[in-house]
Image (cartoon, rainbow, N blue to C red):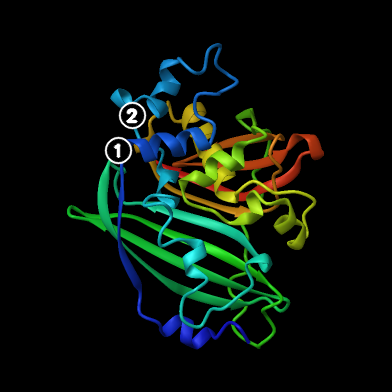
Amino acid sequence: MPIDAAQALAAEPRSGEIGWTAKDVQLYHLGIGAGANPDKDDPATDPDELRYTLESRLHVLPSFATVAGAGSPGVISGLSMPGVDVDLAKVLHGGQNLTLHRPIPVAGTATAGSRIAAVYDKGKAAVLVLRTEVTDADGPLWTNDAQIFVRGEGGWGGDRGPSARPEPPAGDPDRTVDRPVRPDQALLYRLSGDYNPLHADPEFAKLAGFDKPILHGLCTYGITLKAVVDTLLGGDVTRVRGYATRFAGVVFPGETLRVRMWREEGRVRVTVGAVERGDAPVLADTIVQHS
C-alpha cells in the first residue's frame, strides 16, 4: 500500500527556512483577483484595492500563509513524506484550516515545520492531514492544516476520522457577492508556488478525470476570504483569527463564484457556488473567525 499510516505519523517534522517579500504578497493578491473587484467603479485604482496591490499601502491577506515561501513545505511536498507515495493524478485537496497567531508581515523570514498529523481511512480513499507550523524570530505566526484526499488508497481498516459536520447556515445570508474568475486565473495563481499540472495542462487534467484544467482550491479559498474581509470586516485583514473550509467541488477558470455570508458572534459563515453550473457547491462548512 502506498500509504503507510504508522510510518507517516511517526516521521520527524520536515523543517525549512522560508522567506517572502512585498512582491510575493502582491503577486498572490493579483492571483486571487485583487485590482479587479467588480463592486468598484475603477478597481485598479480604488483605494480599497490598492491595499492589496501597491507596496506603499500594502497589507497581507491571511490566506497568503498557504503560499508564503513559494508554498514550501506545502501540499505537494507533503506527498513525498516518509510513508507516503501516491499518484498525483489521484490527489485532491479536501479542505484547509488556517489559524493566525498574529498578523503576517509584508516581508519576512521564518521556519516552517511540516508533518503528517493524521491519516484517515475513508474506505475508497485516504485522507492525510498535513500540518505546517510557521514561526519567526518573534514567535509563532500561523498554523496550516491541509486535508489531502487520495482516491483509491483507503481500505486498510484504519481510523475513519471525524464525521460530524456543522449544520448549514440558517435563514437568508446577510450579504451575497459575485466574484468572476478570469480565464487565466489559474495560470497567474500558480506563479505563487503551486505548479500542480492539474491546473494548467489539459492532458494531465484529463488523466485526473476533468475535461479541462481546474482552478486551485486555494485560489478559491483566497478569493473567498478577500470577499469576506472587504464586505463584512471593513477591509481590516488583522481582524481574521482563523479560516476553515471544505472543498466541495471544482471551479473552472472563467466561471463566476457566488459568495454568501452569514454574520454570527465572532465569526462569519460562508458558502460558495459556481453560478454558471446552477450554483454548484464549491466551498462548504466555511467559517472565518474574527475579532
> Which quadrant of the rendered structure holds the N terminus?
bottom right
Q: Which residue is mark 2?
A: 58
146 w.r.t. 55: above or below: below
Q: Position of residue 140 (x, y in %)?
A: 26, 56
Task: Compute the Cα span from label 1 to label 2.
Answer: 7 Å
Q: Label 1: how many residues lie within 10 Å, few (<14), some (14-19) or many (20+)?
A: some
Residue bearing mark 1: 106
Relative to 44, 210 lies left or right:
right
Q: Is residue 156 left or right of residue 65?
A: right
Kind of residue sitting beneath label 1: Val
Q: Which mark is residue 282?
A: none
- The amino acid pointed to by label 2 is Leu
Question: Do residues under tags 1 and 2 come within 8 Å of each other at their CB atoms?
Answer: yes
Quarter residue 56 falls in: top left
Residue at 47%, 33% in the rendered image: 229
Q: Nearer the viewer, residue 62 or 285?
A: 62
Q: Report if residue 75 is visible in the image.
A: yes
